[in-house]
Amino acid sequence: MRKVMKKMLKVIGIILLIPIVLVVGFLVLASFAKAVPVNYVDEVQTGGDIEAKYLAMGSYTVKDIKVEASEDSKYFYVYYPEDLETVEKKYPAVVMLNGTGVLPKKYKALFEHLASWGFIVIGTDDGSSGVGKSAELPVTRRVTKRPAVLYTHVFTENHHAAAIGPHDVP
């Protein structure tokens, strides 16, 4: 009777272990996938001229930097028009929040695309953006004051200049 119970417990354990291993394997694989494919501007089909125009890359050459952040976010990833370093001009800022733990490194193609159209794009490395504290910091003081190249170029005179958007909001 004991041998039968031991065998049954082993079988039940194996049956329970298989789905757990499969789920963990799937999650590991999913963590390496890009949320926005690198060549999405070439793959997406549009329905009109305006959509096609803005789906293409803009005219700005893009640079990017990684800036140390606070305890809430390890880093801010900033993509911006290269002209920002030499031209006296203000640029609108877009702060991209993750929606469900998807960090900015998965959105590199999207960030480059927006920056090519003249936006300073800031991604927060905050795994749970929650109440938005990590979204406010890049524009108010963390990123716009360090490095100095960004400080004078973020368009902050109009509070509508910074768009903040988690990726999973319908």
Image (cartoon, grey):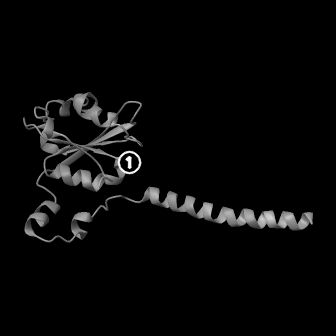
Rendered image quadrant of residue 33: bottom left
| Residue 56 seen | no
Judge left or right: residue 165 versus residue 1. left
For the N terminus, which image quadrant? bottom right
Q: Amino acid at mark 1?
A: Leu
Q: Where is residue 73, by image quadrant? A: top left
Residue drawn at (26%, 64%) of the image: 40
Q: Residue at the location (14% across, 71% down)?
A: 47
Question: Residue 169 placed where, x, y %?
Answer: 30, 52
Task: Please say whether residue 43 is visible from this viewpoint.
Answer: yes
Q: How many marks?
A: 1
- Quadrant where the C terminus sits is bottom left
Residue 161 in the image: above or below residue 100: above
- Residue 51 position, x and y percent, is 13, 64
Q: Is 49 located above or below residue 127 in the figure? A: below
Residue 43 horizontal/vertical position (percent): 25, 70
**Residue, x 23% and y 52% (percent of image)?**
112
Of 59 and 142, the residue lying toward us: 142
Residue 32 higher or lower than 81, as above or below: below
Identify the secondary structure beneath mark 1.
Answer: loop
Q: Tell me: 4 left or right of 107.
A: right
Q: Is residue 110 above or below residue 130?
A: below
Q: Where's residue 29, x and y in %?
A: 49, 61
Mark 1 crowd level (few <14, some 14–19, many ≥20, 10 Å Cα) = many
- The residue wearing badge 1 is 103
Q: Tell me the quarter of the picture where residue 130 sits.
A: top left
User: Residue drawn at (23%, 33%), measured in percent from left and top?
Assistant: 139
- Camera-side residue: 8 or 153? 8
